[in-house]
Image (cartoon, rainbow, N blue to C red):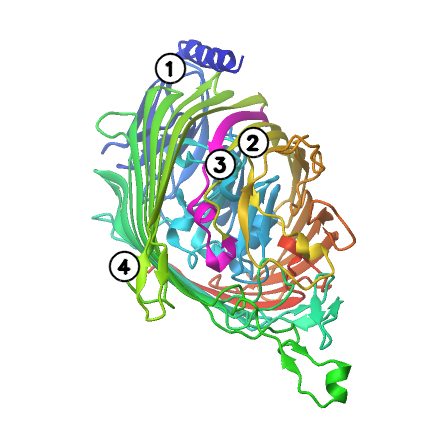
Amino acid sequence: MKYLSLSIIIFLNILQSFAQTGNLKGIIQDKNSNPISHATVTIKSLNLNNVTAANGIYEFKNLPYGEYEVSVSSVEIESKILKINLNQKNKHTNIVIDLKGDVSIDEVLVNRNTNKVEMETSGFAVTVIETKEASLRNLTTNELLDRSVGVRVRQNGGVGSQVEYNLNGLSGSAIGIFLDGIEVSTYGSSFNLNNIPPAMIERIEVYKGVLPSHLTGDYVGGAINVVMKKDVSQNNANVAVSYGSFNTFNADASVSARDKKSGLSFRGSGFYTYTDNDYEMWGKFSKFTDRNGILTRDFKARRFNNTYKAIGGRFEAGFTDVKWADQFFVGYNLSNTYSEIPHGTTTSYPFVGRFAEYDAHVFSLNYIKRNLFVEGLSLNINAVQSSRRTYIQDTVTTLYNWDGNPVVLHTDYMIENGLDPIVIKSPFGAQQGLPTISQTDRKILNTRSNLSYTLFPGHRISVNHKLESTDRDDVNLLKPVNKDLKVVTHVMKNILSANYEAQTFKNKLRTNVLLKYTANSTKQTDPRATFNSDGSYQLNPETKKTFNDNFGYGATISYNILPKLFIITSMENGYIMPTEEQMYGNLETNVLPNLNLQPEQNINYNLGFRYASLEKGRHKVSFYGSAFWRNGINKITRQTVDSIVTDTDLDIPAAAFVNLGKTQSRGVEAEIVYVFGDRLNAIVNFSKFNALYKREFDENGNPDDRHNLQIPNEPFFTINANVQYRFDNLIQKKSVTNFYYSTGYVGAYDIAWHPSEQGYTPAQFSHDLGASYRFPSGKLIASVDAKNIFNETLYDNFGVQKPGRGIYFKLNYTIGKF
């Protein structure tokens, strides 16, 4: 039945393509009627481009009748978007544009909003987060994401701590996290969404369900694609600094330049972050062991051994808008991070002297060419070569309490008999298990190629190939450093996919059909060294290999029922291969290896709607809603840490990923956006779902007491609200002042399978306030943000407490054209 439905969609699309067609022609000119040459005229919905000749003429032939959004862009002019209704055989439309410098801010905002709506009604379940306002404030990229509908950012502590992303119940390897279409993990732990400031980002795309062709991969739950700023149409530079609570300092800078004659372009950006992360913990999951070995809960303590600092840069040089390429850039990323590790999976007891250092060197190449050789043929190549190194040290033997002092045993009997206190040592020799000084080196090659061809207006096919290869060497530096003693791991993933995209019925119906094949192979060789007392050793090498392959398919449909009302639906049946970290472990994130992990399968359905804008006077209201149904087999998830719910100080500081078996998730999400002129902007969204374990009997045939229970450690009910109000000329003429308020609610959820008084995270309500002031010159902006203003107790993964009240100040300075 599914294949029959897909066949009917394809047949209707082809049938519709033979409907009435016409030609669109005109001249691009300025206000003085001078023709503009080498301007790019684009019909985005059909993926058609045309470059004007010396006389400024553009022309599109054999277009289906309907209304089109036509955009005009060039390095010499201001981009313009307009709607043209093609309802006759030959339509002639001249387009008048503004030269650089004559455009207003309002026109720019209209164009940006048009692009956002275009993406959100393209047939995919996608939300576009714009970063312009956030870049002026003390907000991180993860904070922006956490306020988006259906997104939950799971973070084990403060700045720089381990992060996991949850899209309506799906997380981990089911979710793709991209930086310009390449997995962000390729860039290393020190160049991730924790560190990349919004000022370096153009927009964030959040997909739920089927992904577009340029992001096709080993994912079924959706993806987050961070699109970095690429505009080099004019030379400019920006610098920002901020300082706030917990001794947190941030700085970022960016610059872009372009030679108009040759098209040679450069863009560069960098950041620096430092924080002590010494915020106070006092909630229900705080534990303290007194001198008599008695465990006390709700102990108030300040975090220590939690310093985090990171520095990174991104530099790209190449050509834009030249004859042989629309865009060609080679780039270099470098980053370095020092991160103290304050505790394990939970906060049961602190670590002292355990830390990690990361550095990465990444080379990239990006090539885009539309109308390659023939009109309608486009090629996009994105390739990254990464060298990453991780150093972990853990050699302190003494155990510590959250008061910063060693754990001691000093009973009344010892005191009466004048015996000294006994300092408790780790039974394993270090803070988390055996003493460790380890180094992990990774060589990663990640390439993504996309070749697409427009068969005829509104119909496009594309073929995509993704290759990801990881070579990993693990060395224990406490042992003699020898090539023979390295644990060598190789992981390779190949994904071949094909998409057929169509726009029919006067562009009201948009469809996308996806087929993909995935092959994943792994190989690990462990030397299995046995050491003798004289330092010599014998090798008993062990090699393990795995290979898995599978097919997946999916489809999306968007139908424009009314002028501004779109119905959007999608379905997907696909597999997720275990990642290198999930299979082979990761010391810095407390992940143990599990070489027996199986691929996860998911069958997902989404149905939603989006009403672009209901307008009355200066009032505008937009609506979005979606329902989803997800069925998972062998769900890959972090092993539940049940010790957090017991009255014991024993804990499992590290845990492996495991397969859960069958799961099912059903839920809804919705968002309302209200805008009043250019003064008020308010957004309210919520997400509510269940994520149930579905296995009636265990592997021994006995009833499984977890059947129909909510999967633990996953928040399933969230609400977010954000309000922004603008004042003009409040203190000075031509100044702009904005006030912000944000609130978030997370419903209570269980941490372990069988809940108890200590086994659940309570409901959480947080409130943030902020203000920014743009000085009359428009170049300098000052802002202040107060986060968690009521100092609420906020938790995340396995009861780890997040920072309390914090105040942050920021200055942002922009250098205009130069």
Which sits earlier in the primary sequence, circle 2 or circle 1? Answer: 1
Which sits earlier in the primary sequence, circle 2 or circle 3? Answer: 3
Residue indicated by mark 4: 483
Which sits earlier in the primary sequence, circle 4 or circle 1? Answer: 1
Q: Give the quarter of the image for residue 614.
A: top right
Per the model, the C-alpha gap separating discs 4 and 3 is 31 Å
Per the model, the C-alpha gap separating discs 2 and 3 is 10 Å
The image's mark for residue 633 is: 2
Residue plotted at (22% across, 34% down): 54
Tell me: residue 91, above or below residue 441: above
Name the one closer to the observer, 695 or 209. 695
Q: Which residues are magenta?
A: 563-591
Per the model, the C-alpha gap separating discs 2 and 4 is 40 Å
x, y percent for residue 216: 42, 33
Per the model, the C-alpha gap separating discs 4 and 1 is 68 Å
The image's mark for residue 598 is: 3
Residue type for callout 2:
Ile
Task: Please tell me whether mark 2 sits on a helix, a strand or a loop.
Answer: strand
x, y percent for residue 791: 71, 64
Residue type for callout 1:
Gly
Q: Give neighbour class at mark 1: few <14, some 14-19, many 20+ (Cα, 10 Å).
A: some
The image's mark for residue 22 is: 1
Which sits earlier in the primary sequence, circle 3 or circle 1? Answer: 1
